[in-house]
Amino acid sequence: MELKNTLLEIQTQLDKHAFSQYAILVGYGDREWQYMSEGVDLDSYFDAASIGKVFPTSALALHAISEGLLSLDDTLEKYFPGVPKDKNKITVKNLMTHTSGLLRRQYPKRLGLRGRKGVAEFIFSNPLAYETGSHFAYCCDGIILLGFIVEKVLGMTLEEAFETYVKKPLGMTRSTYHIKIDEENMVMCNHRADLGGLIYDDNNVRELCGIPAGCGGNFITAGDLQKFVKALIRKDPCLYSDETFALAEQNYTGGLPILDAIRNTENHGLGFVYVNEACLQARDLFPEGSIGHSGWSGQSFYLNRELGLYVIILSDSMRSFCLNYPKGNHSDKVHQMRIDIHRAVKKDLGL
């Protein structure tokens, strides 16, 4: 069985410059389909963007929770001595559900040269946008702090923890945190025409100067992400316990006021996006209770365990839109690309 509507939709997206390079993987029950552009294979690097918030940062935090090394109720003051009073009661749960009150700020040049302590102090120096727990506002800075906490409780860098607790146990091949600007078998995902000698797309990740960024400063392959998605579907105990799977895949933000509804209306579990009517990018294909995540540069994955269904989209979508259409809201275009592909898959699978 060929996914004819999906193939037609891929061509439509190519025609409108929604991407130029891509890897799209679909699984349903015991059947799988792989569609990749010329020169792309299962081992091609893509900038993970915000997929890195869950693959692997949230997964590593959930592993630590499963092992009793971390609690959702742990507060910032436990891990960051001297944290300002207005932020010392922010919990791990607040960080993972984007309810901390923190908002992303532009980092100063070369902030990472101050070390992790200096990065955390800069994040703490910014005022809270709302009372902790009272609103939902998607926040990269909170997940960077979560990454620092994971490093503390696991006793190794985020990169080492990924290798130890995710990459090796699941038999992954290439996904990592640091690659060269001329790395072989890499898809350029940077939305700038001129990279300025740096490979990272995210401005703040660039200013971390090599400190592994929990918010998405890593590079992933379709083959490795597929292994992660399949491990989630089968509740692989090498990731974390069955009880922790249940804990992670709940809607923790439903009903909370959203600080910026124009930019983000999705509900969240622990790290993962919780799919329901609010998840415009996935709701047409995936039933409520499905989980996943998406990334700025054009990446996404969503899965439903009961159906054995997943769709992985890795692409250079943001770069392609920025280079071909210098003006306009390209985030909306990237979102629509995902919606259109998910709708085509739905039609092909008869769901």
Image (tube, rainbow, N blue to C red):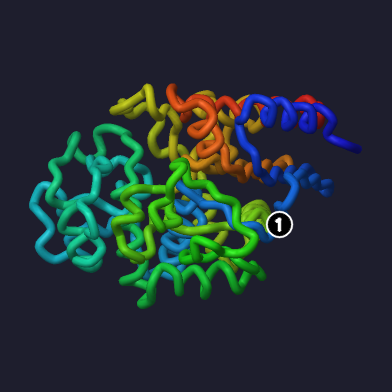
Q: Residue at x 48, y 33 (%)?
A: 322
- Residue 145 found in image quarter: bottom left
Residue holding disc 1: 42
Instruction: Mark yes or no: residue 299 visible.
Output: yes
| Above or below, comparing residue 328 to residue 215 in the picture | above
What is the x, y in percent for residue 138?
35, 38
Residue 183 placement (x, y as % from top left): 56, 64
Residue ID at (41%, 57%): 198
Split into 4 quadrants, where in the image is the N terminus?
A: top right
Q: Residue at x 53, y 50 (%)?
A: 246
Above or below, 73 relative to 291: below
Residue that extends furthest to the bottom in the rendered view of this protein: 155
Give the quarter of the image for residue 102: top left
Helix, strand or loop at mark 1 = loop
10 Å crowding of disc 1: few (<14), some (14-19), many (20+) = many
Q: Where, by quadrant of the figure, is residue 286 drawn?
A: top right
Please say whether residue 250 is visible from this viewpoint: no
State the count of labels: 1
Amino acid carrying label 1: it is Leu
Residue 27 is situated, as x and y percent measured from the top left of the image, at 75, 45
Tell which of 270 and 142 is nearer to you. Answer: 142
Residue found 63% across the figure and 31% down from its top = 287
Q: Is residue 267 left or right of residue 145?
A: right
Residue 213 pos. (x, y %):
37, 59
Q: Relative to 73, is 194 on the left or the right?
A: right
